[in-house]
Amino acid sequence: MLCNCYLLNCEEYNRMSEKKTEKKTKSKTVKTEEKDAVKETKKTTVKKVTRKAKAEETVAEVMVAADGKVAEKAKPAKKAAAKTTKAKTAAAKKTEAAEEVKAAAEEIVQDLGPRRSVAFIGSECYPFVKTGGLADVMYALPKELVKQNCDVKVILPRYKCIPWVYQEKMVYRGEFYMDLCADGRQFYVGIMEYVWDGVVYDFIDNEEFFSSGNPYTNMVDDIPKFCYFGKAALSALLYLNWIPDVIHCHDWQAALVPVYLHTMFENTGLANSKTIMTIHNLRFQGIYDIGTVRYWSGLPDYVFNKDALKQGYNDANMLKGGLAYANMITTVSNTYAGEIQSEFYGEGLDAHLRYHSGKLRGIVNGIDCEIWNPETDERIFTNYNVEDVIEKKKANKRALQEELGLEVDDGKFVIGLISRLTNQKGLDLLNIIVPDLIDGNTQLVVLGTGDSYYEDSFRYYEGAYKGEVCSNIMYDEDRAHRIYAASDVLLVPSLFEPCGLTQLIAMRYGTVPIVRETGGLKDTVEPYNMFEDSGNGFTFDGYDAWLLLDAINRAKTLFFEYRDSFDKMVIRDMGKDVSWENSAAQYRNLYLQLKPE
Ligand code: ADP
């Protein structure tokens, strides 16, 4: 499907683990530990109670109540600690503080409602393997769900290209043979486990399917690979005797899971688990001829009918089957949930989606605010926060200009573009207007890989506008962070955009997004209103190059002529909530809806 596979390097991993070790060694004395524990309890309590309060729309009251509770809790803890300081040993005090934390945590857990277990099944997950936004979601959503009283297991292929730094930490959990194909051919399934931040990652091991250098290659190989993966994921759950309340499947690569569950697994322990099928990008559906899919999946003939897997005369569509059999369908924004039911955005499945619209919901994505945090981000030149963003962004801009060989001048208007270079991303519009953008005061920085047509055209512009256009035709996570931090605006002129993460990251870094009003871009970027001085970015509706140019020119006018208003928008953007907290709560509510008992 996509080819710009990014693998987290060892350096990054080491940085993360160094940070953790550093934190641990800092709390040296028992006294400090005790204080920290009480503080931490208070923080967690307030945060979690706030979350609940939001749901009940009584934030203020509950905050006060929570604070009171914590203060009450902290008082006896402190008193007790004071009494025991003399009498007890340091070790005993430590235990007491830890019990305080545990008791408070248990109380809060009850507040969040019943615990739910969820198995995430998908084909990529940051930081093990990433080609796009799906990997970000597969990492950040489980991490947030764990904080919201869910047990989450993420099931992934164990690709050979997963960096060794992770491979070596995986623990062997078992192996078995599974029949897969219509003729009952047996295949090896190994399970390797890695636990991180409260999330359990189970990797399905089979060299035959997962040994290429890229998660996706071509449909001839990918169809058998993901038939195998779907069935192996369910078999692994049975093998591990881990029966989740909900099985949450992501994109076509996991779409056979609901189909298997209602056919070959209907008499197993998993029969009562409910399924959610999330569409991250409807363009990719896993379509191939029926004969091949039927052989590799081993699924019974009757699922290859026009209401489930069959498409057209002779094709099978794996996503279509998953949508038909799933208990619930979600996609990654409300607007996209509506759009995909229309012919223009429906990618041939609009009628199918209209038919199933009763079980279709849109839940917008968030971003991981720890990874994307300009205040702590080690990959950017100068850290900043909402207080000093205006000055510090200029420092980041100058450093990036120097790194990329652009004219160093923080007065220039720097436009960033971080994207897969495909026609989905609106690059045809940008291609037309690049000459009109470059006016002596503007610089364009592109980071992306993809179709050679777009790669070449951006290379051409770099040559034609030396010092003003820089085209980084590569996949580079570090450079992406630096571009987010240094740019004044970020372009996302997509033809369609299920959710889009780059505009969310941009706002977190005080970079004003310029987006087309489609999908998640429409749901997350409020257009600038010059009368009220409100909004988060500049938007345009029709898929038209001149409308894009107009939006960029509106941004330029604000930047050059009304800098105060532009700066206020930068600050507003940094304050916008783009975290997973709200959206994860919506997923949790869906799980509870599907499995109330
Ligand atoms: P999609 O999933 O359609 O590619 P999203 O906006 O949902 O688009 O997610 C894109 C993710 O990939 C973001 O985290 C973005 O920063 C990252 N990304 C895209 N291209 C590159 C690149 N060339 N180098 C580094 N990161 C990239």
Image (cartoon, helix red, strand yellow):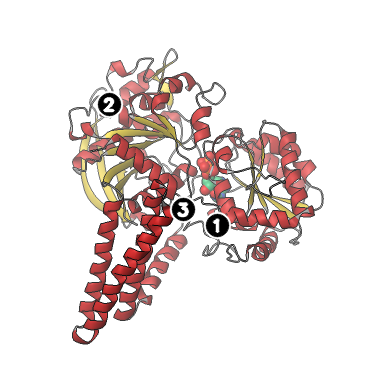
For the point 32% across and 71% down, the residue is 38
Q: Position of residue 191 (x, y in %)?
A: 26, 46
What amino acid type is highlighted by mark number 3? Answer: Asp
Q: Which mark is residue 368?
A: 3
Evaluate whether residue 205 shows in this view: no
- On the image, numbered disc 1 is attached to which residue? 478
* 331 vs 41, nearest the viewer: 41
Find the residue positioned furthest to the bottom.
86
Q: Earlier in the sequence, mark 1 or mark 2?
A: 2
Q: Position of residue 106 (x, y in %)?
A: 25, 58
- On the image, numbered disc 2 is attached to which residue? 181
Q: Secondary structure at mark 1?
A: helix
Q: Position of residue 559 (x, y in %)?
A: 74, 53
Q: Find out if the beta carbon at label 2 lies less than 8 Å from the nearest ligand 1 atom.
A: no
For the point 20% across and 78% down, the residue is 92
Q: Earlier in the sequence, mark 3 or mark 1?
A: 3
* 533 vs 417, nearest the viewer: 533
- Vertical order, 550 against 406 (above or below): above
What amino acid type is highlighted by mark number 1? Answer: Asp
